[in-house]
Image (spheres, rainbow, N blue to C red):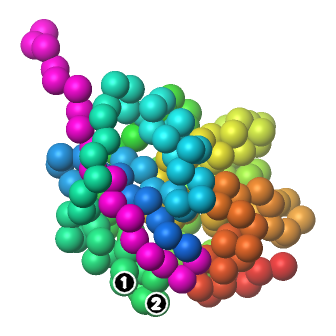
Amino acid sequence: MRNAQPETLTLDRAATPVGEVLLVTDGEGAVRALDFADYEDRMTRLLARHAPGASMKAGRAPEPVRTALERYFGGDVHALDGLTVTTGGTDFQRSVWKALRAIPAGETRTYGQLAAAIGSPKAVRAVGLANGRNPVALIVPCHRVIGANGTLTGYAGGLERKRWLLQHEGASVA
């Protein structure tokens, strides 16, 4: 086994209609984290779990990533679908995040539906916890998960942002 050098990630910042976002990419151009600037501490904690030992430097994300983000906020709600994401997490968490990426823009799922989609229909709470530990907001669209009664439930970026994002994507919001 060779000695791997600590990974260096790039932190970019981009203005959006719902506030500045932090965009963390790796040397391969994969998105490692995306969160709103007012939740930078949370993003840093999540990133420490997903990329232990990594250092971060300010810089510019690869143009395809920046362009996809701009297109998404410009109205192309499918622009983020093809971006590569790399995360840590448990097998269970990664299965939840994969299921999140399968929710089409303009649609929502309940935590129960998400649990059923990954073959663990009784794991509703665990799905909720995995959803909350998603380090790549928007691209892994945790904002598309709602409560069983159709109401908006917790979102790390705040419920007003969640409402805006769902309306932006064309979802009906209770």
Q: CA distance from mark 2 to mark 1?
A: 6 Å
Q: Are marks 2 and 1 in contact (CB under 8 Å)?
A: yes
* Residue 174 is at least partly visible in this image: yes
**Left or right relative to 150: residue 35:** left
User: Which SS class for mark 2?
Assistant: loop
Which sits in the foreground, 148 or 136? Answer: 136
* Residue 95 is at least partly visible in this image: no
Residue at figure coordinates x 40%, y 71% from the top left: 14
Residue at figure coordinates x 66%, y 80% from the top left: 164
State the image coordinates of residue 16 (x, y, percent, origin top left).
48, 78
State the image coordinates of residue 84 (x, y, percent, origin top left).
30, 56
What kind of residue is marked 2? Gly
The quadrant holding residue 1 is top left
Is the residue marked by circle 1 packed among few (<14), some (14-19), or many (20+) residues within 10 Å? some
State the image coordinates of residue 145 (x, y, percent, origin top left).
69, 61
Residue at figure coordinates x 73%, y 84% from the top left: 172
Report the number of discs: 2
What number is the disc on residue 71? 1
The chief SS type of the magenta part is loop
The residue segment tinted magenta is: 1-18
The quadrant holding residue 124 is top right
What number is the disc on residue 75? 2
What number is the disc on residue 132? none
Which sits in the foreground, 24 or 163? Answer: 24
Vertical relation: 9 (above or below) 110: above
Reply yes or no: does residue 42 show up in magenta.
no
**Left or right relative to 122: residue 33:** left
Farthest-out residue, left: 2
Residue at figure coordinates x 20%, y 71% from the top left: 63
Vertical relation: 61 (above or below) 130: below
